[in-house]
Image: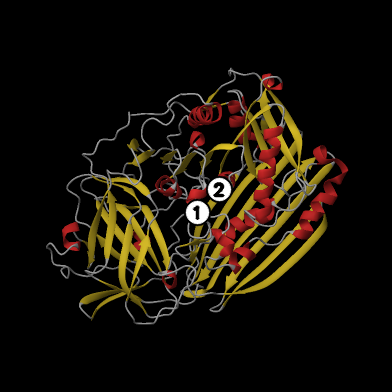
Amino acid sequence: MRHVSNLPYAIKEEEDVRIPMPDGIQLSARVWRPTSSDNDPVPAVLEYIPYRKRDLTSVRDSLHHPYIAGHGYACVRVDLRGTGDSEGVLKDEYLEQEQADAEAVLAWLAEQPWCDGGTGMMGISWGAFAALQVAARQPPSLRAIVIASFTDDRHADDMHYMGGAMLSDNLAEAGTMFAYATCPPDPAVVGDRWREMWHERLENTGPWVLPWLRHQRRDDYWRHASVSEDYQAVQCPVLASSGWADGYSNAVTRLLGHLDVPRKGLIGPWSHKFPHLGEPGPAIGYLQEVVRWWDHWLKGVDNGVMDGPMLHTWMQDSMPPSTAYEERPGRWVAEPTWPSPHIRPARYPLTRHRIGTPGEADGEGGDAAAGDGTTGGGTVGAGTVGAGAAMTVRSPLSVGQFAGKWASYNAPPDLPYDQREEDGGSLVFETEPLTERLEILGSPTVELDLAADRPVAMVAARLSDVSPEGAATRVTYGLLNITRRESTENPEPLEPGTRCRATVQLNGVAQAFPPGHRVRLSLSTSYWPLAWPPPEPAMLSVYEGTSTLTLPVRPTEEPDEVVANPFEEPEGTPPLKVTRLTAAEGRWEVKRDMVGYRAELEIVKDQGLVHFDEIGLDVGRRAYERYTSVADDFTSATGESTWTMRFRRADWDVRVVTCTRLSCDERDFFVDATLDGYEGERRVFSRTWNETVPRDLL
């Protein structure tokens, strides 16, 4: 990244500005703005998140907020109620209070003498969620938003219930927020009230996994703040981005297709990162694009920002399987609109071990019953029921140990590894070696004619790029809890042995398959620990000929409608100075005990101890996750998320330690959690939870 100090506007920074809420609570804000705004007001841009502006996000904030301010904007970074140095308690995500507070913040900003009355919102992840959700409430000052790594559907396309199957990130991210919401404010900012504010948080915050687990269906809890419920509520321009390695690869194209406002989309090869910090690379000059967006929509500059294609995306070239990439080879392609006129869905029939040709799916030739069954180490066989032959699979619980993380952060390496071991317990279909390059852009779908022998069953569908040497790189995947095949609001148990149809939608992707490679589709009935397993193993029968794979094919002869590199080099302002005191540690280890048949995935993300030079504060963050199971006992699945957060000065040393453990039997989930607060080595707060939540066809 190129660090830029010479900007069009000299800026000033105000470290702690108090913004009053209607109920008397005060939120803490950091403000960067042009010095000239004292006399010449400018638009204000808000980032509104719960991740501690004074320390935990301060280095990242220092890269882009002063940069945008230096181009003529008041950039305002606000800690949510109950986080950082703001007052109050944060009990859950995206509540009505949070959004009402955001509207109050925007109204306050618009009234400041240094603001011209116009505002925008920006952010990644929670900050992007907040911006999109607040945009749907149409506050009068909000003119445009810029969002990265977000969703418009909180139930189906977030870290909770993918395809109605519960993700392990439902636990992991709950553990993250349990820790962040119970950290103390900084005495250097709030003074002697810090201990009172901290204990208010400790006493009123519970394990975040509990409300998420108590709403296993799509109900009003999830409909609230899901913009997909009413896209027309968003009435301001939207610049939306994400990455193919992120868990949020789908929402950009959904917004492009459903919104009726000026909009642009950008999808790179990135994990859960801002595009100017994008990993895997290439990163891009995202902040330059953001400034152009604000210049047009907040200042009225006629800069052509809406010219050109609606969507830019990175078409990824084939790569060997790896848990991390520094760069993803490929090229930028562009689509004039979305849905794109360039994309042509191709429907392929699934027969024994074979992905047929599109013509066969429509009855135009080919023998849908030809070929021999090819399967791996799962329980797989063949039989005849009705008009088509059935292929069956009952996967071992070990399928999924090389799945990587639902949303990659690229640290520690967390992308899926070689899928050949996973395929050993799966039902596998693949094409003949390709004779020419195949490119796809969009969301593949698998339509299955199936039956299960249990009332609750799931299917995981994985699409892989198989090299001539046999290595299998997962390209995309999708999950379906089959009890939710008709409705996530009103699921119904399966009738064992009865055929039904179910569609599995895979995550969106842009991927090229070179000549000589094969496209492989793998189906499994477990995908642990990425997804929580059903109550018991299920045998799935998939009927050939009437089951299909549909790929969103982008013909290679179609024009790319984009120059080779449409973006500038990444740039930002110089980062805040910090001094590392202890080394960081990152681990992702799969372990197997061949005596007790215990399998374990252990994840360590330890940021080490870092000294923030400007404020004289030492900060440490350590996250530990462990997922275990025994043999094929689906009720042995257990997940654990433990966080330690530390804040230290010469006269102040505080720690928060949270632990959330999730286990199950065939009927219930069990949540066992602890929260401990320490001053020095003295434990000053401790609480334990032991809760039971019934399984709801999950």
Estimate the spatial distance between the alpha carbons at disc 1 and disc 2, rounded to whole Å: 8 Å
Residue drawn at 37 percent across, 48 percent down: 509
Residue 290 marker = none
Helix, strand or loop at label 2? It is loop
Q: Nearer the viewer, residue 388 or 303?
A: 303
Helix, strand or loop at label 1? It is loop
Tag 1: Cα neighbours inside 10 Å, few (<14), some, or many (≥20)? few
Residue drawn at 36 percent across, 57 percent down: 419
Tag 2: Cα neighbours inside 10 Å, few (<14), some, or many (≥20)? some
- Residue 576 lies, with reference to residue 95, above or below; the image says above
Residue 117 left/right relative to 433 = right
Q: How many marks?
A: 2
Q: Marks 1 and 2: CB-CB under 8 Å?
A: yes
Q: Residue 550, located in which quarter of the rendered image?
A: bottom left
Residue 511 left/right relative to 595 = left
Residue 662, visible in the rendered structure? yes
Q: Residue furthest front?
A: 140
Please, what is the three-letter code of the amino acid marked with disc 1? Answer: Asp
Q: Nearer the viewer, residue 37 or 623?
A: 37
Q: Residue 334, located in which quarter of the rendered image?
A: top left
Residue 51, visible in the rendered structure? no
Q: Position of residue 614 (x, y in %)?
A: 73, 30
Q: Position of residue 62 (x, y in %)?
A: 63, 31
Give the residue number, with chain letter if any, for mark 2: 136
Give the residue number, with chain letter if any, for mark 1: 230
Q: Earlier in the sequence, mark 1 or mark 2?
A: 2
Q: Position of residue 326 (x, y in %)?
A: 44, 38
Residue 170 left/right relative to 513 = right
